[in-house]
Image (tube, rainbow, N blue to C red):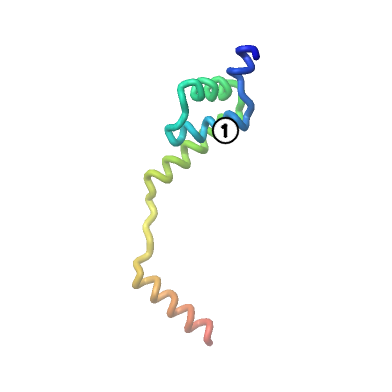
């Protein structure tokens, strides 16, 4: 097998390397193959960027939930409206 076939990967392989890289499981060779692929593949660059955004959102959620008392009040109001 030629060295080019070992270095250049398909899009599904690049996406797999991107996922591995996201979870810090990619080897140095995987990272090199991924970066070479990202140079010429716009779709995989977008996939990689979206993966990065998703990771940031999951690690730093800014979601505020409704207090349990408010949830119970909403349930009770819904029950009353539905029984009317």
Q: Farthest residue to the front: give it.
A: 1
Relative image position of residue 73 (x, y in whole percent): 39, 76
Query: The N terminus lies in which quarter of the figure?
Result: top right
Which of the 4 image quarters holds residue 66?
A: bottom left
Secondary structure beneath label 1: helix
Relative image position of residue 69 (x, y in whole percent): 34, 72
| Residue at x 61%, y 23% (from the top left corner) | 9
Q: Farthest residue to the bottom: give it.
A: 84
Answer above or below: position of 62 versus 26: below
Residue placed most toward the observer, 24 or 47:
24
Relative image position of residue 10 (x, y in whole percent): 64, 26
Looking at the image, residue 56 sits to the left or right of residue 30; the answer is left
Residue placed most toward the observer, 1 or 74:
1
Judging by the rendered image, the residue that carries numbered circle 1 is 15
Relative image position of residue 11 (x, y in whole percent): 62, 29
| Residue at x 52%, y 32% (from the top left corner) | 18
Residue placed most toward the observer, 26 or 39:
26
Q: Residues within 10 Å of mark 1 (few under 14, many from 20)?
A: many
Looking at the image, residue 11 sits to the left or right of residue 31; the answer is right
Count of numbered marks: 1
Which of the 4 image quarters holds residue 58?
A: top left
| Residue at x 48%, y 78% (from the top left corner) | 78
Answer above or below: position of 10 versus 74: above
| Residue at x 47%, y 31% (from the top left corner) | 21
């Amino acid at each position: 097998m030629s060295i080019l076939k070992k270095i250049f990967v398909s899009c599904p392989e690049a996406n797999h390397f991107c996922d591995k890289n996201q979870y810090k499981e990619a080897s140095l060779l995987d990272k090199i193959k991924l970066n070479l692929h990202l140079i010429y593949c716009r779709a995989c660059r977008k996939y990689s960027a979206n993966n990065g955004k998703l990771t940031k959102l999951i690690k730093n959620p800014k979601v505020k939930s409704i207090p349990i008392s408010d949830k119970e009040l909403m349930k009770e109001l819904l029950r009353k409206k539905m029984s009317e």
